[in-house]
Image: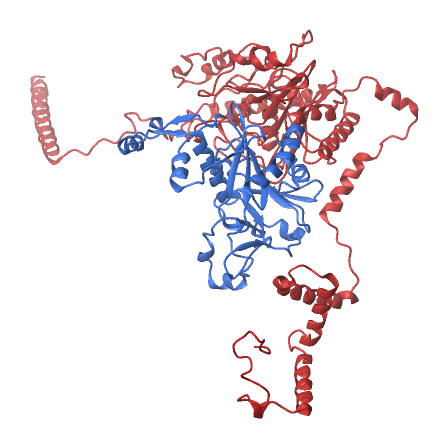
Chain colours: A red, B blue
């Protein structure tokens, strides 16, 4: 309670000299003493922090008067805390600051390398570069997509542009395209789709052939070993489905080679070509990408390979349209009829290849070896036919009343300069734009297909029987007591009967001997 | 994201590849302040957009003086004309939660309830109501679900006064880089559920004015958030895997933060299989 104001009740009650505490109010000298005591109390240093209240209040009020924040009384506690924090920092000044290596500066270093010109040669370089170059104009594509609200920030697009340029200068590339970005759990992937110049891929295929031959030899050895042994555990009747060879590099699902990097500026990693087994498997599992290429994918059915392969097969499925004799129809027409858009690359068959491979040829050889071959090959696999090249998008399968693609214009207000945009509903994140003669595809997303139903993982197959059940190893039930007794009685009868016969024979022999 | 800082915020949240085109940005820059004037909101936020099959819904929300009060939500099909959405009720959320599939893009589209759950439909018929749900209802319920499940704010951005109301913390200077990478520095901006279950020891470390919400640490399933540093480590971006499309961004040691939703409005129920 401060001094009472005239309008407050209690005013005039406690006049000096008349209040009940009169005897305790000190005279002026005692008042000075009381003030000094109060100040001494305020100056007392705290045992824990070494601060004292007097200095703290002085600093706080100084700060408030310097900064003059609005409604200071509401934030007084925070100001107090800030002043205290500021106190502590000064005491550490005796140590020299070790410069922290912030992750931001490291990243900036990496990206700085993008901006440096690699070759300091003369004008000849410039002329070569201005000619035909496989480098796509990422910024132009980004501009068109941006009209529809799709795309990364301009900074990131430019970084990717420079990173692609570095890739092209490092590898012999004929065509290159920014495929898109796949988001992952720990890191994201930026993907470039390239086609090598002809003749650059031979080394790889040779290596692979050598590996394949090596495997075949191994198989033969195993077969001969097994035939020699006779007392072997029963051979497993599990026959893995015939391995469908992957398609040649440069055709089908492996038409393009994909390069991946986590962030523009980091080195590009080439993804290995994909095998059909991986495609089939990848269709059945649904997992997020982590962002590390060597992360194993734990799932059922067991995914052969690791994340790098999963990506490769995602890339191959992007749809496309291209036609050199393209007559650019008006943008409005393109939006109206989806039939003007067609698929470019072959779609991937359920088998995992683009060109159907007949596995029944190989299985004939194996039939001769195996004896327990049942009629597994009786139903020959039907020839799998996918939609032919350049089928119009309007014939794409619908997903339960949902059209496979959604088309729209980028702007309703300025239709003469609008861009036609297609969004895929089956692969959310796949976009295509077309404007005049220009078109491009891109993907931004998590890398999953859209399905209305919840994902249910494939169940493991039923447990195989350990051994074939036949009469020789089947247990028969023990005979009951009656059966045993009956059997015993029958045996005794038989024994008695045979003894009688022997006696008759002996008698006959004795008779014969006697005769002689 | 706040309407006043919309362009900068969109740049920061653009890592996911989906955003707004220049036309929409320009339109929002003019229509959101008008909304603020018409409805007398203190703050207007652009919430995001939900992509339907035939059209896109653009969503905004407006706040009054108490930040913890239920927010008014508005939707538009072209970012020019906005309509107020009815407040969400629990029944709406339960009903709409059973609907599957994409949004159509037409607010008056009616979902036939008999296909989904015959018993409930019969019950509704007995009550005298028709067994249909309008897409508007589904929109309201979805936004409510998304906000309550994955609408997040950094720790320290909001303070609770002893009287119970919630304000923005004017002294909030942003999380440090170390703190920004941890999930425990972010809170769900809804009624806390897990707070009471903490042990006394844990509660002793909490600051009741700042730690009055649930943190992201104990979200089920674990790993349903991805934390990444983008733009060379200058922005921390959190993406939700439960509602694919929700992006939260924060520039450490600054006051810039916000979240936006660009997606189809469907919950990712396959999440446990995908982790």
Q: Decide: is B139 above or below B177.
A: above
- Give the percent coordinates (x, y) of residue A399: 47, 21
Residue depicted at 57% across the width and 32% down the height = A446
Residue depicted at 85% across the width and 32% down the height = A117
- The image shows a total of numbered marks equal to 0
Quarter of the image with the C terminus of chain A in it: top left
The foreground one among A380 and A387 is A387
Quarter of the image with the N terminus of chain A in it: bottom right
Q: Decide: is B184 above or below A396.
A: below
Q: Determine the image quadrant of residue B78.
A: top right
Taking the image as shown, residue A446 lies to the left or right of residue A146, namely left
Taking the image as shown, residue A465 lies to the left or right of residue A513, namely right
- Give the percent coordinates (x, y) of residue A494: 10, 26
Q: Decide: is B221 above or below A513.
A: below
- Give the percent coordinates (x, y) of residue A193: 68, 23
The foreground one among A497 and A294 is A294
Taking the image as shown, residue A414 lies to the left or right of residue A278, namely right
Residue depicted at 45% across the width and 28% down the height = B101
Answer whether residue A271 is visible to the viewer in this image. Answer: no
Q: Determine the image quadrant of residue A480.
A: top left
- Give the percent coordinates (x, y) of residue A357: 54, 13
Answer whether residue A94 is visible to the viewer in this image. Answer: yes
Q: Residue furthest right?
A: A122
Q: Decide: is A5 above or below B99.
A: below
Taking the image as shown, residue B132 lies to the left or right of residue A334, namely left
């Amino acid at each position: 309670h401060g001094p009472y104001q005239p309008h407050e009740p209690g005013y005039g009650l406690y006049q000096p000299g008349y209040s009940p505490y009169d005897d305790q109010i000190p005279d002026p000298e005692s008042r000075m003493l009381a003030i000094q005591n109060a100040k001494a109390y305020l100056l007392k240093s705290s045992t824990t922090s070494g601060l004292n209240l007097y200095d703290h209040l002085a600093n706080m009020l100084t700060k408030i008067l310097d900064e003059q924040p609005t409604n200071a009384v509401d934030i007084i506690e925070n100001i107090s805390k800030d002043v205290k924090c500021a106190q502590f920092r000064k005491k550490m000044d005796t140590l020299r600051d070790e410069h922290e290596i912030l992750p931001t500066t490291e990243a900036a270093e990496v990206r700085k390398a993008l901006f440096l010109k690699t070759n300091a040669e003369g004008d000849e370089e410039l002329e070569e570069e201005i000619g035909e170059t496989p480098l796509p104009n990422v910024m132009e594509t980004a501009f068109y997509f941006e009209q529809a609200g799709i795309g990364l920030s301009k900074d990131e697009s430019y970084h990717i542009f420079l990173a692609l340029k570095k890739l092209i200068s490092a590898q012999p590339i004929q065509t290159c395209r920014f495929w898109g970005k796949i988001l992952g759990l720990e890191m994201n992937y930026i993907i470039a789709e390239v086609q090598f110049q002809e003749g650059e891929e031979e080394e790889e295929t040779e290596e692979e052939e050598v590996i394949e031959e090596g495997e075949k030899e191994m198989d033969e050895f195993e077969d001969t070993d097994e035939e020699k042994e006779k007392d072997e555990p029963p051979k497993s009747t599990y026959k893995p489905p015939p391995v469908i060879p992957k398609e040649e590099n440069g055709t089908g699902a492996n038409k393009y080679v994909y390069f991946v990097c986590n962030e523009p500026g980091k080195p590009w990693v080439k993804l290995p070509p994909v095998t059909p087994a991986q495609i089939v498997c990848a269709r059945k599992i649904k997992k997020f990408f982590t962002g590390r290429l060597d992360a194993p994918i734990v799932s059922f059915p067991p995914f052969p390979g690791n994340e790098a392969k999963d990506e490769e097969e995602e890339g191959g499925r992007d749809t496309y349209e291209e036609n050199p004799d393209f007559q650019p129809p008006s943008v409005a027409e393109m939006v109206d009829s989806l039939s003007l858009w067609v698929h470019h690359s072959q779609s991937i068959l359920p088998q995992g290849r683009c060109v159907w491979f007949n596995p029944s040829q190989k299985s004939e050889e194996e039939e001769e070896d195996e004896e327990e071959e049942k009629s597994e090959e009786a139903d020959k696999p039907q020839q799998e036919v996918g939609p032919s090249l350049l089928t119009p998008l309007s014939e794409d399968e619908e997903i339960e009343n949902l059209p496979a693609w959604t088309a729209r214009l980028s702007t309703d207000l300025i239709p003469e300069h609008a861009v036609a945009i297609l969004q895929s509903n089956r692969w959310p994140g796949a976009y295509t734009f077309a404007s005049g003669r220009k078109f491009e595809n891109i993907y931004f997303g998590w890398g999953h297909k859209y399905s209305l139903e919840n994902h249910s993982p494939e169940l493991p197959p039923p447990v195989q029987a350990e051994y074939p059940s036949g009469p020789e190893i089947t247990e028969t039930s023990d005979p009951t007591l009656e059966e045993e007794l009956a059997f015993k009685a029958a045996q005794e009868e038989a024994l008695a009967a045979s003894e009688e016969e022997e006696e008759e024979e002996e008698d006959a022999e004795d008779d014969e001997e006697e005769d002689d | 994201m706040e309407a006043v800082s919309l362009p900068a915020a969109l740049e920061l949240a653009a890592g996911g590849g989906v955003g707004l085109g220049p036309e929409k940005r320009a339109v929002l820059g003019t229509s959101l302040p008008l909304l603020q004037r018409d409805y007398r909101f203190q703050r207007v936020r652009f919430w995001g957009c939900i992509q339907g099959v035939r059209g896109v819904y653009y969503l905004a929300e407006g706040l009054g003086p108490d930040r913890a009060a239920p927010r008014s939500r508005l939707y538009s099909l072209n970012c020019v004309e906005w309509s107020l959405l009815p407040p969400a009720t629990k029944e709406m959320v339960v009903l709409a939660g059973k609907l599957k599939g994409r949004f159509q893009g037409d607010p008056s589209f009616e979902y036939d309830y008999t296909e989904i759950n015959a018993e409930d439909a019969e019950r509704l018929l007995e009550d005298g109501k028709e067994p249909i749900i309008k897409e508007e209802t589904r929109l309201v319920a979805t936004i409510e679900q998304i906000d309550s499940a994955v609408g997040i704010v950094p720790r320290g951005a909001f303070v609770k006064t002893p009287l119970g109301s919630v304000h923005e913390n004017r002294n909030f200077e942003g999380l440090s880089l170390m703190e920004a990478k941890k999930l425990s520095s972010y809170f769900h901006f809804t009624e806390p559920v897990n707070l009471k279950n903490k042990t006394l020891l844990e509660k002793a470390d909490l600051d009741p004015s700042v730690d009055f919400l649930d943190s992201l640490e104990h979200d089920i399933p674990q790993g349903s958030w991805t934390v990444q540093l983008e733009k060379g480590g200058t922005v921390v971006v959190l993406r939700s895997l439960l509602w694919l499309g929700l992006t939260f961004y924060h520039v450490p040691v600054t006051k810039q933060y916000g979240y936006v939703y660009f997606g189809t409005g469907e919950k990712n129920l396959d999440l446990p299989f995908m982790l």
